[in-house]
Amino acid sequence: MALSLYVTIASYASAFAEKLHRDERGQDTLEWVLMSGLIAGAIVLILGVFTTALNVMATNVSYCLDFAKATTCSPGF
């Protein structure tokens, strides 16, 4: 009795595992999600590293565009 129950459960488990191995639905979606997450992480990392430089550059460009003030135009290049 116990042996036949074990064989039945093992048979179902084996069939289920093989079905999961062959089923590739959603694989493309998972790949896109992983790639999007990698790109988003890279953008956050780059912006975190260059925050000060980007702020200085934006401030200097705004000085160039503000014609009412007598400032020197130095965008930082």
Image (cartoon, rainbow, N blue to C red):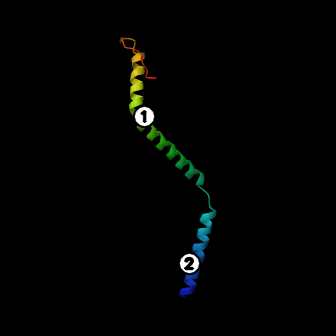
Q: CA distance from mark 1 to mark 2?
A: 58 Å
Q: Nearer the viewer, mark 1 or mark 2?
A: 1
Left or right side of 43 for 32: right
Is the N terminus in the top left, top right, bottom left or bottom right quadrant? bottom right
How far across and down, in percent of the image, does residue 33 sit? 53, 48
Q: Residue at x 53, y 86 (%)?
A: 2
Q: Residue at x 59, y 69 (%)?
A: 16
Q: Nearer the viewer, residue 57 or 10?
A: 57
Residue type at mark 2 is: Ile
Marker disc for residue 50: 1
Q: Secondary structure at mark 1?
A: loop
Q: Nearer the viewer, residue 61 or 28?
A: 61
Q: Is residue 50 above or below residue 13?
A: above
Disc 2 packing (10 Å; few <14; some 14–19; many ≥20): few
Q: Secondary structure at mark 2?
A: helix
How far across and down, in percent of the image, does residue 52 sit? 38, 31
Q: Residue at x 41, y 25 (%)?
A: 58
Marker disc for residue 9: 2
Residue type at mark 1 is: Phe
Q: Is residue 18 above or below residue 74?
A: below
How far across and down, in percent of the image, does residue 34 sit? 53, 49
Considering every residue shown, the one lying at the far left of the view is: 69
Left or right side of 4 for 72: left
In this rendering, the count of numbered labels is 2
